[in-house]
Amino acid sequence: MRIDWKTYDPGAFYDELISSPGHARKSGRILARYLGSLKNEELQQRKTAAELAIKAMGISFTVYSEAGNIDREWPFDIIPRIITETQWRSTSKGLEQRLRALNCFIHDVYNDQKILKDKVVPAELIAKSANFRKECIGMKPRFDVWAHICGTDLIRDTNGQFYVLEDNLRVPSGVSYMLENRKVTKRVFPELFENYNILPITEYTTQLFDMLAAISPRPLDYPEVVVLTPGIYNSAYFEHSFLAQRMGAELVEGGDLVVEDDDCVYMRTINGLSRVDVIYRRIDDLFLDPQVFHPDSVLGVPGLMRAWLKGNVALANAPGAGVADDKVIYTYVPAMIKYYLGEEPILENVPSYLCIDEKQCKYVLENLDKLVVKPANESGGYGMLMGPQASKKEREEFARRIKANPRNYMAQPLISLSTAPVLGERGAEPRHIDLRPFILQGRDTYVTPGGLTRVAMVKGSYVVNSSQGGGSKDTWIVTEEER
Amino acid sequence: MLSRVAERIYWLGRYLERAENTARLLNVYSTLLLDLPRGAKIGWHTLVDITGSHADFADKYQTPDERSVIRFLLSDTCNYSSILSSLALARENARTTREIIPSEAWEQINNLYLFAKENASKGVARGPRHQLLNQIIAHCQQIAGLFAGTMSHNSGYNFIRIARSLERADMTTRIVDVGSVTLLPGLTEGVKSEQIEPFENMIWMAVLNSLSAYQMYRQHVLDRVNGEDVVTFLLQDRQFPRSVVHSLAKLESCLQALPHNAAALAEVASVQGMANNADIPLLLQKGLLEYIDDLQIHIAGVHARITETWFLPVVSGQQQST
């Protein structure tokens, strides 16, 4: 038995490989033909090989609810996803543009607040934002950049057009899996790389290190850059360790760091204390410094905020950057791009309704069965209402929550996510996917070619989060041959 | 290098060495016990005694028969010093120091653990046991080789070697202890005196074999295998890599390269003095047991100095078992 693309039916959705039963898109023809040439047993063998490689390489993540099972193997589908470079070029520009505008916004919010005074963004939104940190007011980080690392989630509608679903500006994760997915594909399908021109992605960790080194407060040849992890039980520990290893940086926990009387940060080494210049922190704001935020946090470092505000250490991302990582603020990003950059937005937002606006809120409450409702500050897909799939009771519960705190909610129509073939036991089947590219900004900006493709492994499901059982795919940006 | 990382990598070194040593021990004793005369008061419990885990064993098992002892030392995860537990802990320490150890080494440690987890329970049966243990030993050696060949010989590597030397010195004292204090008297009690001599010889060979020392001993000591020479060789030989004196010398040279090493070096010097100055013929007649206990206490003292000097004052994350 082989894959028969004639029986593969993506239905009304935009499938990224197969445009209609039996017909592959131009960029995917070689891939579709090659997959169709393999017997199902051969495909299953490749799948097993990938699983073994992931096990041996120790690519893992943790699921909180499964106590005792610390790390789990990373779920991966072996069929790569193809995006053409032509499509990607403008998307990539749009992502850079977005992050530049977001950084202007964050800097403005903590300094002059011009955008609020000009009433482009309502001041009330900031006053009530759970991620606004008053401790950061007046701070001027290097290059005026606050969000140095951003993971922006993109989806494609039934026409294949990219939309921005959300910007993750706090501690976005997933980039290590993007890099490891490519490595696994190289082990499993080496022959495919001969027929495609695929943009390499390995440069990311070098770019990340250069960016982090550039924001160091001390102009040295070798600034001490460290990655701060909440510890070995964190769901993204694999990634923290991976990035530290690839950058040759120390991976530290809160207990390894200390702020001395000179307001500088030091790490405890076998030689004694040693100065730290840049901290790539993978701990949420509120756990960073027990003297300023949660007093009982043992993950953070007492005095860290003091050292940062004095300019003695750089933090990436800066505390308070999450003020722009808010699903309500999100709806104002196109306005920010025009306001700060004087440019037209290259990437569109998903149409959104703000519950803080009375008229829009009314619409949301009347159409809960058609909408996806999101709280402003959750991540990982938690606390959402998927209107069309929810029960009446769940919808009523959400209506109550929205009325109680309209500032905290926004709603979007259910966008039909694009699909891609996933290898099941009996062959290929369409599953919904999204894309998380990673964008860096320091002195310059950088966008990963492609990103992490996340897959909802359950038929018909839209839930792609790995914390809720989603999978992933290698993502290829391919250059078309010129003829 | 971070103190916390130094601590984890040190434990990685100890657990790997412990897994290998335990595998060697099981291998040799499994073979030896088949040759002993019926009635000899030497049984499988000796293995439990060597690893110093008598109480843990008694908690869970009724009798020290072959299956129970092998299961306890090989695949029982309730026993923190079983081979499988040691490898799980080695893997956990490697997983949490992945940023500084070579990725091939991590992959091999991970693979070794996965292999042991999958196969350890098969080793309870005599048939496949020998091959399984040999695979584990070979795998440990391969990992040691990967460290030597692919890791910069920096502080991290030094901590691995320090840990290995310390674990080795400790294990060698235990094996000498058991050979001379438990096995021989056990044999003499149950067996007629004219039968003792051939078996005595066999026991000393087994002691040497459990440390892969037989061949090197024969090259070094021209006389036939006898207790006095074996104990001298294992405690005091300068060239054999698993002898106590050699392990301590290695330990000393690794410590030399670390900062603030005075306290640890002083402690090593005192153990070295004890090992070098021991009057073995005299001790074999009387007092070997007390002497070895004392030696082990001093070896534990070296571990204590290392912990005080270089590791974090509060043990973060996990509890390690000495």
Image (spheres, coloured by chain):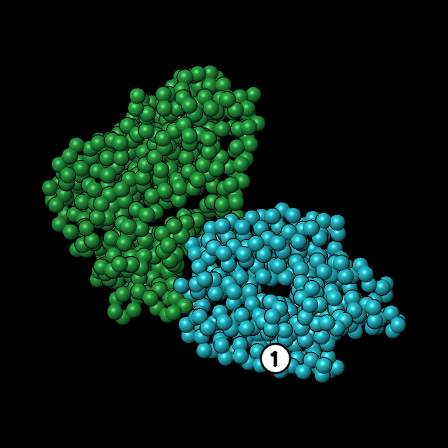
The N terminus of chain B - image quarter? bottom left
Q: Residue at x 58, y 71 (%)?
A: B246
Above or below — where is B159 with respect to A36?
below
Q: Amino acid at mark 1?
A: Asn
Q: Is residue B54 visible?
A: no
Which chain does the numbered disc 1 sit on? B
Q: Nearer the viewer, residue A143 or A294?
A: A143
**Whole-percent x, y for residue B270 in the image:** 55, 80
In the displayed structure image, the side of residue B124 where residue A354 appears, left or right: left
Q: Position of residue A257 (x, y in %)?
A: 35, 63
| Residue at the spot 65% in from the left edge and 48% down from the top edge | B119
**Is residue B231 visible to the viewer in this orientation of the structure?**
yes
Q: Which chain is green?
A: A
- Secondary structure beneath dot 1 equals helix
Residue drawn 58% across and 61% down? Answer: B17
Q: Which residue is mark 1?
A: B276
The quadrant holding residue A201 is: top left
Q: Nearer the viewer, residue A243 or A318?
A: A243
